Image (cartoon, rainbow, N blue to C red):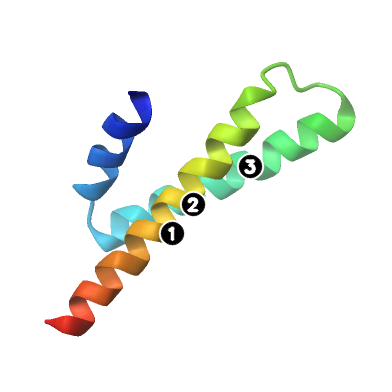
């Protein structure tokens, strides 16, 4: 259920806001990978959540781009 709420929040964002959110998530992903490599990662499930959020944002960006191309 959290994913659906997250998706509706993302759909309401503009293209620039999505790009900013994507950048923020990529930085977080880098930090999580770094923490995993050094053995400091406590919440291992967060890695998958961030990866899926990045995929959601990229999907929405492609959809918005396709809709803009049709219009």
Q: Tell which circle, 2 or 3, labels the residue nearer the N-terminal end.
A: 3
- Say which element carries label 1: helix
Instruction: Say which residue appears at 17% left-offset and 82% top-offset.
Output: 70
Residue 59 sits in quarter: bottom left
Q: How many marks?
A: 3
Q: Farthest right residue?
A: 38
In which quadrant will I find the N terminus?
top left
Q: Which residue corresponds to mark 3?
A: 29
Mark 1, residues whose alpha carbon is within 10 Å: few (<14), some, or many (≥20)? some
Q: Position of residue 45 (x, y in %)?
A: 63, 24
Camera-side mark, 3 or 1: 1
Asked if marks 1 and 2 touch (Cβ < 8 Å), the reply is: yes
Asked if marks 2 and 3 touch (Cβ < 8 Å), the reply is: no
**14 shown above or below 69:** above
Mark 3, residues whose alpha carbon is within 10 Å: few (<14), some, or many (≥20)? some
**11 shown above or below 60:** above
Q: Pick the residue in front: 44 or 22.
A: 44
In which quadrant will I find the C terminus?
bottom left
Which label number is shown at residue 58? Answer: 1
Q: Which residue corresponds to mark 2?
A: 55
Residue 18 sits in quarter: bottom left
């Amino acid at each position: 259920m959290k994913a659906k709420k997250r998706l509706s929040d993302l759909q309401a964002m503009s293209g620039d806001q999505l790009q900013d959110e994507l950048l923020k998530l990529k930085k977080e992903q880098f930090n999580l990978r770094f923490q995993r490599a050094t053995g400091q990662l406590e919440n291992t499930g967060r890695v998958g959540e961030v990866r899926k959020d990045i995929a959601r944002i990229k999907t929405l960006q492609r959809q918005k781009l396709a809709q803009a191309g049709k219009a």
